[in-house]
Amino acid sequence: MSHGHGAAMDEHASAQGTTGPGGEPVPQSATGNPGPPLATDPDIDLHVPQQRQELRHHPAVLLGTIAAGGVLGAFGRYGLSVAIPHARTGFPWSTFLANVSGAFLIGLLMVLIAEVLPAHPLIRPFLGVGVLGGYTTFSTSIVDTQQLVAAGAARIALLYLVATLAGAVLATLAGTLVARTVARRGGRRA
């Protein structure tokens, strides 16, 4: 058994109990050492009490909520791809529209649930991570770009790549501005 400085620190931490930034206990393994963090939503800011609420739910509930939302989002994206098919060398409109509209909705949603309306702690993981994460598909836009280049449509590929990136950033900004404008007109904080 090691008796160095690190071992003394581990014994001290387990004797004192380990707490997170908000004073909440950190799970410990059977040996008394801090266990892995419970966060499954990578954009949780532990300094914001409303976001810390997400961690109070059992990880299976949180993961199940995200998965259920992801299924719905993926169905929506699939429906869009069936409704607006594209030729091998044509502009992939369905993927473009999914990414841009999803980015708009993410901007709108994040302002509404973070700044305007009190929301259930599972709303953000369900809608933001699950539904909109399953609906948007930036990885598919990269595959589409590669396929367009391979099919000899490099100009369309470049246009598509730039339009997707610029469109998503602008759509997120637009969603944020729309939500804040509506909130101000409704007398809510934003």
Image (spheres, rainbow, N blue to C red):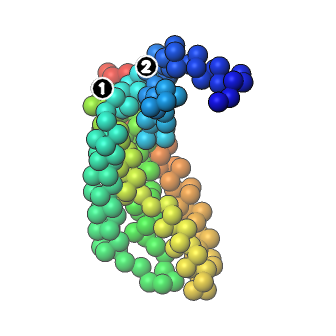
Q: Residue at x 27, y 52 (%)?
A: 68
Viewer-nearest residue: 145 or 17: 17
Q: Residue at x 52, y 13 (%)?
A: 16
Residue most toward the right? Answer: 4
Give the amino acid at mark 1. Answer: Pro
Give the amino acid at mark 2. Answer: Glu
Q: Nearer the viewer, mark 1 or mark 2?
A: 2
Q: In what quadrant of the picture does the N terminus appear?
A: top right
Dot 1 or dot 2, earlier in sequence: 2
Viewer-nearest residue: 177 or 101: 101
Query: Image quadrant of residue 24?
Result: top left
**Residue 86 spot, x, y in % from top left:** 41, 79
**Element at label 1:** loop
Query: Is residue 44 visible to us here?
Result: no
Q: In what quadrant of the picture does the C terminus appear?
A: top left
Instruction: Using the image, tell me which numbered label, if any, was put on residue 150.
Output: none
Viewer-nearest residue: 153 or 44: 44
Query: Is residue 63 visible to us here?
Result: yes
**Residue 115 spot, x, y in % from top left:** 39, 27
Residue carrying label 1: 118
Residue carrying label 2: 24
Q: Residues within 10 Å of mark 1 (few under 14, many from 20)?
A: few
Q: Residue at x 52, y 15 (%)?
A: 15
> Marks 1 and 2, Cα distance to the nearest angstrom?
22 Å
Q: Is residue 9 left or right of residue 54?
A: right
Q: Residue at x 40, y 52 (%)?
A: 133
**Residue 54 spot, x, y in % from top left:** 36, 32
